[in-house]
């Protein structure tokens, strides 16, 4: 059938629009049975997956955010480390004792982690934060004015882990539209065959109207593409005319 072949010729984005419009047309047809047919249910399920796949990724933006948090985490750790190291020579006995207690925790893995794996770096930061958050260090943190600083450090670490793991989870389940393309095309074609068969078999005005409306959905996508080509050609010719005139 001519209409079905159009599903093979349009782009991924147009195929996604076609799927959405066909489903919307069926839902608004007033035919309850049309919403429960096997082919329509398959189309809805495949379309849901295809629409997710077609959404442009923001991998670059997420990657940049991860880098920013990675750097911020390191800077905050170094600030606390250097601050406590300086307090080790404080003339205030209580301040010095508090800093010695805390410095023993923050320095137990050393100061520079850049030569080890990123996952191992994260684990060290987590262990340090977990240790400093223990009740026995509350007084020392308050004395050295590091309570809020530790809370901020902990939040940056949590944000980094959430974003890093979340990005990994998205990438692991992300499917390219091209991998679902054929399945989406077949779902649309099979559903159209079903609607066409129902319209011929039942010969009711509602089913025939639905069939014609779905045909229009195919036409609309094709017209849109044609208009884009015409616009492009027109713009190109206009530019050539302009250059010639100059």
Image (spheres, helix red, strand yellow):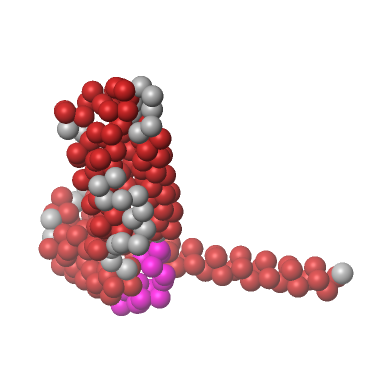
The reply to whether the magenta stretch includes residue 125 is: no
Question: Is residue 225 positioned above or below 213 on the image?
Answer: below
Q: Decide if residue 234 is on the left or right side of residue 21.
A: right
The N terminus: image quadrant:
bottom left
Instruction: Residue at 36%, 53% (x, y): give it.
Output: 112
The reply to whether the magenta stretch includes residue 10 is: yes
Question: Is residue 12 positioned above or below 110 on the image?
Answer: below
Q: How many numbered circles does the render carry? A: 0
For the residue pair 21 and 149, the one nearer the viewer reads as 149
Snapshot quadrant of residue 85: top left
Q: Position of residue 138 (x, y in %)?
A: 22, 26
Q: Position of residue 230 (x, y in %)?
A: 59, 68
Does the rendering let one see residue 11? yes
The C terminus: image quadrant:
bottom right
Q: Position of residue 210 (x, y in %)?
A: 27, 58
For the residue pair 149 and 11, the one nearer the viewer reads as 149
Does the rendering let one see residue 47? no
Q: Main secondary structure of the magenta part?
A: helix
For the residue pair 63 and 108, the one nearer the viewer reads as 108
Instruction: Residue at 29%, 38% (x, y): give it.
Output: 103
Instruction: Residue at 27%, 70% (x, y): give it.
Output: 180
Snapshot quadrant of residue 216: bottom left
Residue at the outermost right position = 246
For the magenta stretch, what is the residue range? 1-15
For the residue pair 88 and 134, the one nearer the viewer reads as 88
Snapshot quadrant of residue 207: bottom left
């Amino acid at each position: 059938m001519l209409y079905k072949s159009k599903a093979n010729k349009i782009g991924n984005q147009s195929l996604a629009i076609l799927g959405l419009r066909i489903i919307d047309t069926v839902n608004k047809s007033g035919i309850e049975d049309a919403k429960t047919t096997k082919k329509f249910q398959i189309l809805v399920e495949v379309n849901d997956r295809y629409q997710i796949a077609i959404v442009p990724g923001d991998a670059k933006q997420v990657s940049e955010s991860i880098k920013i948090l990675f750097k911020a985490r390191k800077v905050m750790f170094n600030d606390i480390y250097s601050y406590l190291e300086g307090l080790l020579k404080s003339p205030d006995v209580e301040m010095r004792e508090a800093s010695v207690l805390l410095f023993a925790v923050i320095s137990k893995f050393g100061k520079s982690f850049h030569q080890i794996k990123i996952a191992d770096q994260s684990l060290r930061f987590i262990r340090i934060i977990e240790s400093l958050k223990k009740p026995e260090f509350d007084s020392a943190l308050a004395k050295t004015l590091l309570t809020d600083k530790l809370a901020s450090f902990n939040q940056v670490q949590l944000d980094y882990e959430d974003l890093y793991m979340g990005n990994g989870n998205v990438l692991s389940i992300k499917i390219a539209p091209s991998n679902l393309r054929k399945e989406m095309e077949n779902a649309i074609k099979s559903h159209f065959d079903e609607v066409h068969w129902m319209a011929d078999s039942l010969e009711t005005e509602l089913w025939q109207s639905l069939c014609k409306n779905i045909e229009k959905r195919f036409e609309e996508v094709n017209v849109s593409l044609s208009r884009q080509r015409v616009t492009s050609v027109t713009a190109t010719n206009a530019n050539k005319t302009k250059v010639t005139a100059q």
